[in-house]
Image (spheres, coloured by chain):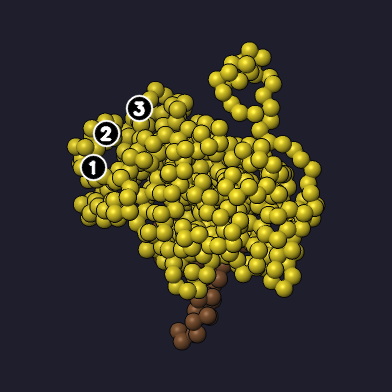
Amino acid sequence: MGYSALSLMGHAFRGNTQWPTLIAAPDMRTIYDIVIIGGGGHGLATAHYLAKIYGLTNIAVCEAGWIGGGNTARNTTIVRSDYLLNGSFALKHFALKLWEDLTQDLDFNIMYEPRGYIDLAHSDGELEQFELRANAMRLRGADAQILDRSALKARIPLLSLDMDKRFPVSGALFQPAGGVVRHDAVAWGFARKASQAGIHIFQNCPVTGFDISDGVLQGVQTAKGHITCKQALISVAGESSAVAGLAGINLPLNSINVQACVTEPVKPALDAVVNYNVGLSYLSQTAKGEFVLGGATDGYASFARRGSFERIEDVLARAVQMFPFLSRLRLMRHWSGTADITADGNAIVGQTPVSGLMINSGWGYAGFKATPAVGHQLAELLATGILPDLIAPFALDRFALGAEQDDAGIGPYPWLH
Amino acid sequence: MLLIPCPYCGLRDESEFVYGGPARALPDMDAQTPEAQHSLYRPINPRGPLRELWYHSGGCECWITLTRNTITHEFEDDLS
Ligand SMILES: Cc1cc2nc3c(=O)[nH]c(=O)nc-3n(C[C@H](O)[C@H](O)[C@H](O)COP(=O)(O)OP(=O)(O)OC[C@H]3O[C@@H](n4cnc5c(N)ncnc54)[C@H](O)[C@@H]3O)c2cc1C
Ligand SMILES: [Zn+2]
């Protein structure tokens, strides 16, 4: 079942016509120990670590659409851990450590490329704030550097450093371990490994209701039948309000459209991820040569999952400020995903008021980077019943307790995060 | 791209507006903590019609309340 140079060659000789499907198609049982709702990266990573670390395999993953059809394969593939708050940093930094070995762990090439993440500052004041963040990262054991304009010129020769711009670049925060990971491979790799371990994955199988009695979970309703289970995890990104609502849980979040786009492919020109901070626009170049661009959310509530020119124009105008040559490239495709954005801009992970029902939501436009760490920690919670330290700061009850995790200090306005 | 029906200025481009989020009832100034929390964090996230606030910063500078469908992006208010 494993991949090797020999198996690659063998399949090449047979014209690549006999590759086995990545995941099995089992019949659904009526009882499972755990049901994972949502077959995105987070749900599938949780399944994988439940099998790998705790040997638990009587588990069903129910996915409404297809594996990797959600935000996992719609994102711009950036991973980094340059966060100020301890809680935000620690979880994403643990994820960076896991990304390093994940290709070997899954026997599936997820193409983690630590090309470096470069966050541009546009004033001396902003650069000072970046130094604060860099120092906080160093204190917690991460490598972070401040690049001045000449260091930036040496690292990213094509970046425009002209001073006659409205928002000239004054320097940058550089995290060498930041970079990109091939997002579909993450969904497929986790799914394949979980399936090989004996976990059942069902596609086209939305969860439509919960059985709860006296505040204790008894089972879930799915399109393929009823499942009796003691524990379930909701991990459905943009649909979090709707699915948690089926269990009577109100999550403090709004669903907002986030867009991304790619240019036509060209020769290698950029070997880092670069982020422009006035209004947000970021880009990286794929292995195929396309530039992938993303930016801020559309800013208003939406489940439409379709792009709008307003934001694309915005993102491209800023990208051209960084790299003027981009103006001569054609845009090939653009798409969007529904991001679940909470009242403090940070995730909601852990227990819910319903005993046995766990939640993982609120990752918005920034949760891909955390995928393996979230799965690892949720597996611990589901297997042992003990809330792991790394996810404790993201409990749902933090809003009632006034313990918000607001990295940007924006306040309880999801559409502004 | 949204064309937003401002009751004062007519159909105007989305870029002229600042979004103010779902329209919600504000708590009394001396409300008890649970009520104050509830009004801050009460989730309003429907798939479908949503009453929401927009600030027409690039036009009449009024805060307006409109109903928009979050799946189709169509406004339900008409200007006639
Ligand atoms: C355009 C864009 C760019 C982004 N860029 C980045 C980035 O560069 N870096 C980063 O870290 N993050 C980024 N993100 C965020 C990141 O993609 C998400 O936070 C992350 O992928 C969420 O993973 P998930 O597994 O929770 O969600 P998903 O992959 O969306 O999985 C949730 C799944 O639940 C399923 N589902 C829904 N309802 C039901 C139901 N009733 N029953 C069963 N299943 C259901 C859905 O079909 C879906 O497959 C971006 C997001 C977008 C939209
Ligand atoms: Zn107006």
Q: Does label 1 or label 3 sit earlier along the sequence?
A: 1
> Which residue is pictured at 44% across the width and 67% down the height?
A404
Q: Secondary structure at mark 2?
A: helix
Image: A321 above or below A355: above
Q: Return the chain for callout 1.
A: A
Residue reaching furthest top? A13
Percent position of residue A363, x then y: 51, 54
Q: Return the chain for callout 2.
A: A
Is there a contact, CB below 8 Å, between mark 2 and mark 1?
A: yes
Mark 2: few, some, or many residues within 10 Å (few <14, many ≥20)?
some
> Which residue is pictured at 20% across the width and 40% down the height?
A149
Question: Marks 1/3: CA distance?
Answer: 20 Å
Mark 3: few, some, or many residues within 10 Å (few <14, many ≥20)?
few
For chain B, what colour was chosen? brown
Q: Which residue is mark 3?
A: A269
Quarter of the figure with residue A106: top right
